[in-house]
Amino acid sequence: MTIATKQAQPFARNHLIRDASWQAVYDAMRQNPSVYVFGEGAWVKAHYDAPQILKEFPDRIVTMPISEDGNVNFAVGASLLGVKPVVDVITADFLYRAMDSIANTAAKVNFVRPDQPPSTIVIRAEFLTGGPTTGQRPEALFTHIPGLNVVIPSNARDAYGLMLTALDTPGVTLFFEDRMIRDDLITQHNGPLWLAAKTPIPLGCASWRKRGLRSGVTVVSYGLMLQQTEQVLSSWKFDGDYYSENNDLGVDLIDLRSIYPLDWNCIRKMLERTGRLLIIEPDVQYAGIGAEIAATIAEVMPEVRVKRLGGKRATIPAAQSLHGEMMPTEEQIVDAVSNW
Amino acid sequence: MSTLLATGSRTLTEQMVLIRAVEDQLQELCLQGLGADLHFSKGQEAICVGVCAALRETDYVVTHHRSIAHAIAKGVPLEPLIAELLGKAEGMNRGMAGEMQMSYPAKRFMFSWQLVGTCVPVAAGLAWAVKNYLKTDDVVVVFHGDAATANGQWHEGVNLAAVQKLPLLLVCEDNHLAGNVRPEHYQPVDSVHQRMSGYGLSGITVDGNDVDEVYEQAKRALSIVRHYQEPYMLECDTTRLGRHKQGQGDLRGKDEIARLAERDPLKGVDQDLRQDMEARVAQLIMEVTL
């Protein structure tokens, strides 16, 4: 059975990633009777987005109040008896309301019970681009906290595989879905694959999205910026490497997929060949995951040249016409890739 | 090991005397710099002893940072408990948890947490899993202080437990203090259990320093929770006779402490029993610390 796909709502550009993660939850529920969904409006969401789950497992979809902090603590309590909760916090901005229960409770619970069966908890939230408190990308904050894994799929296949893995990984995994990723571009590059290859994807395992034979630049990205970078590069010439008219440097593009743990082996292996690192992140660049990658690479591979592009450290305006200014533009990406 | 120290065979009075003896001697270790700043229950022992005596062995306990007395009352063996409090690898959580995050699921002492209020929604989630996942008729007891009812987590947790109709007994250890702060700064109601009415729930206030009354009322409260599958509060009026924690001062004067000590649940207990217990505990702690 496949979770029925529906068109995305007007405020979001995709449903493929959503459907794929629901599919993974459904498949995990069939395999494991301890998987439950606890979410704000969970029953209604499942009714629209995953009716098959509601039909087969109505008692395992638990509708929670709008009390994010309490809901995560509640899930921790249930996990002490073996329940594997998927906690749906809905929007990434709401994670700030659950910061205490995530950072102080969930992240520590396995550590303080070293001889007990570990808790497995998935906390799901999505990115929009809507306004001051509806569009923040706070993922880097969570990579700073011991006890948390952080994954951000850029396509449906990865969403499926990462959710499956998260539900089988002791500890807490924050699972982000970026609603600004375009379905039509996923379909073009990496859409229906997840239906054919329903496999788990290990945490901390990046994927090569483009790999040239004589590349001179390694671009590391994830989520929305991965897709936008890929879109920029797709208009370049290709003869085993990617070139533009003004640029003779071929490009490797890495999709991190999980930003904690990070796939350092993949990044270093690529840099041994290219010697140039460009990190493009959708989160605020200041003190973001790119800063961690840049600093670490500077320490262990001092010969590598490093550049970063990322979101501005600015509040997101409500006016849609201004949203384009929040993240790196196509021109900035081309310039950063080409000019070293 | 003396039979007096074996779990399960102690009288309520012996249980309280044991807790007092363990905490008093841990306090000495703290003052010598051998232990951390622990949070003791001196003067509040009757609550956890009375409530835990009324529990089935299979019922669960969740609690807050002042957890040592609760662990002993729920039957956690003393050696791994004391080792944990002293930061030893032989501790029940290998020294990773300390007093404020320790747990011992073999005795269904499930969870304790430093942050005030956190224990309530966690206990609600545990009660949800007992009822809907394990599908047993066991009850979860969560201990919290009166000061915790000013925290959002207490309210979110009680709301969740009420909506989900969970077998959760809230035991409020009402010592009329938030650290060193008086209730006028955090409690706008006369009795804590009044707050339960905001969630369609109820509770009762009892003398938390009378172990027999606590035991009898806990029996009654537990039967309500188990039978009706809804939360209930046992509000236990009590007196904290020691400091908030060992490394912190106490703003209360000697006169006030002396007045509170009139209600000490161990008042009038046979001195021979106390001295005997102190000697046995001293021996035990020496064995653990060696």
Image (cartoon, coloured by chain):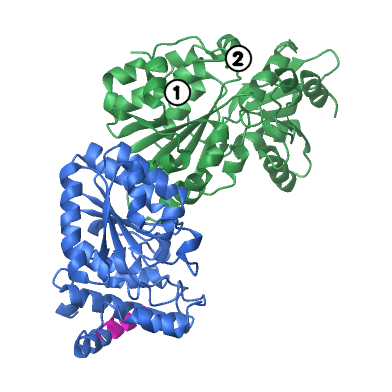
Instruction: Look at chain B in the picture and name its colour.
Output: blue
| Nearer-N-terminus badge (2/1) | 1
Real-space CA distance between mark 2 and mark 1, rounded to the nearest whole angstrom: 16 Å
Q: Determine the residue positioned at 80% across, 22% down.
A: A249
Image x and y of residue B187, in percent: 44, 58
Examine the structure image and report whether residue A43 is included in the region drawn in magenta. Answer: no
Secondary structure at numbered mark 2: loop
Quadrant of the rendered structure where residue A285 is?
A: top right
> For this view, does A299 lie left or right of residue A259?
right
Is B8 placed above or below B261 here? above
Subunit that carries the residue with mark 1: A
> For this view, does A265 lie left or right of residue B153?
right
| Quadrant containing the C terminus of chain A in the rendered view | top right
Point out the residue furthest to the front here: B190
Q: Which of A245 and B8 is in front in this view?
A: B8
Quadrant of the rendered structure where residue A167 is?
A: top left
Q: Name the residue under label 1.
A: A21
| Quadrant containing the N terminus of chain A in the rendered view | top left
Q: Determine the residue positioned at 61% across, 28% down.
A: A134
Image x and y of residue A240, in percent: 69, 15
Q: What residue type is labelled 2?
A: Arg
Image x and y of residue A299, in percent: 73, 48
Q: Which of B193 and A310 is in front in this view?
A: B193
Chain drawn green in the picture: A
Q: What stretch is highlighted in magenta?
A: B280-290
Q: Which amino acid does label 1 sit on?
A: Ser
Numbered mark located on residue A140 in the image: none
Image x and y of residue B13, in percent: 19, 76
Is B133 placed above or below B151 here? above
Q: Mark 2 points at which residue?
A: A182
Subunit that carries the residue with mark 2: A
Query: Mark 1: few, some, or many residues within 10 Å (few <14, many ≥20)?
Result: many
